[in-house]
Image: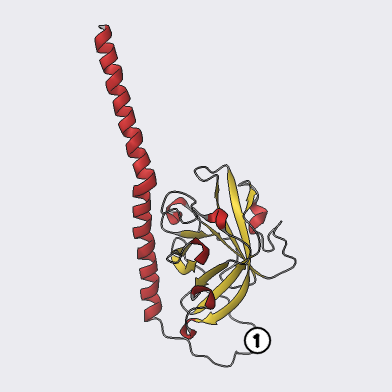
Amino acid sequence: MSVRLIVRTFSELCITIGALIVLFVLYVMFWTGIKAYDASDGQIEALQDKWAQSPAPVRTTPPKGPPPAPEAYEPGKPFAVMYVPRLGRSWDWPVLEGTKTNTLKKGLGHYARTTQLGETGNFSVAGHRRTYGDPFKDFPTLRPGDAVVLTDGTTWFTYRIANKPYRTVPSDTGVIDEVPRKSGFRGSGRYLTLTTCEPEWGSSHRLIVWAHLDETQPVEDGKPSALRS
């Protein structure tokens, strides 16, 4: 084989590898985002259709005795929509049950072992920092006092963030305990934990923020103040 042929073959190989790398980067940065936006929009539309078909709750005197246990969330299915004004006026993502890879391609994922939305305990949610729509790309900008608003179609839940993002390792599962460790919270309460990957394009660590439930209001009363400002 001549030197010229070797050089030509090597050059063609480099061009092919370079083209594959470019295609992969385009896929990761753009195509996964397009797919995620389509999927999340579909999840939100499905939720809104479901809520629209459900009869409006009738306000009555609370029954005596303990309230009935909430209905379990269905794995991989949406049950709420989250809004974080700090992350953008149009920032809204569906919250689905579970944190499996395919689930997080469609929106945010609820840690199944944590409490349900608005209940006493720690309602914990994970989201991608990058790829699949970059829902938590600007996670480091979150600050104490920021609102995190969720709705399940009948109630608005407004949580208030209590800390700047806390950096830890993936094995630190205590961050989603019922009373999350290192959060500064003491005793039982209605808490929220948000988690995402750190660094921005890696997953060696996690960023965490904790919040406490600040207020609730029925959906028929209109949007909460945190979404009107």
Q: Is residue 80 above or below residue 18?
A: below
Is 187 situated left or right of 141 in this image?
right
Q: Residue at x 59, y 51 (%)?
A: 207
Q: Position of residue 69 (x, y in %)?
A: 58, 76
Residue at the limit of the structure toward the right, as seen here: 186
Who is closer to the viewer here, 212 or 126? 212
Q: Residue at x 47, y 86 (%)?
A: 57
User: Where, by quadrant of the figure, is residue 41 drawn?
Assistant: bottom left
Helix, strand or loop at mark 1: loop
Q: Position of residue 23 (x, y in %)?
A: 32, 38
Count of marks placed on residues = 1
Disc 1 residue type? Gly
Who is closer to the viewer here, 150 or 101? 150
Q: Is residue 219 above or below residue 129?
A: below
Q: Position of residue 43 (x, y in %)?
A: 38, 65
Q: Position of residue 190 (x, y in %)?
A: 64, 71
Name the residue beneath numbered marker 1. 65
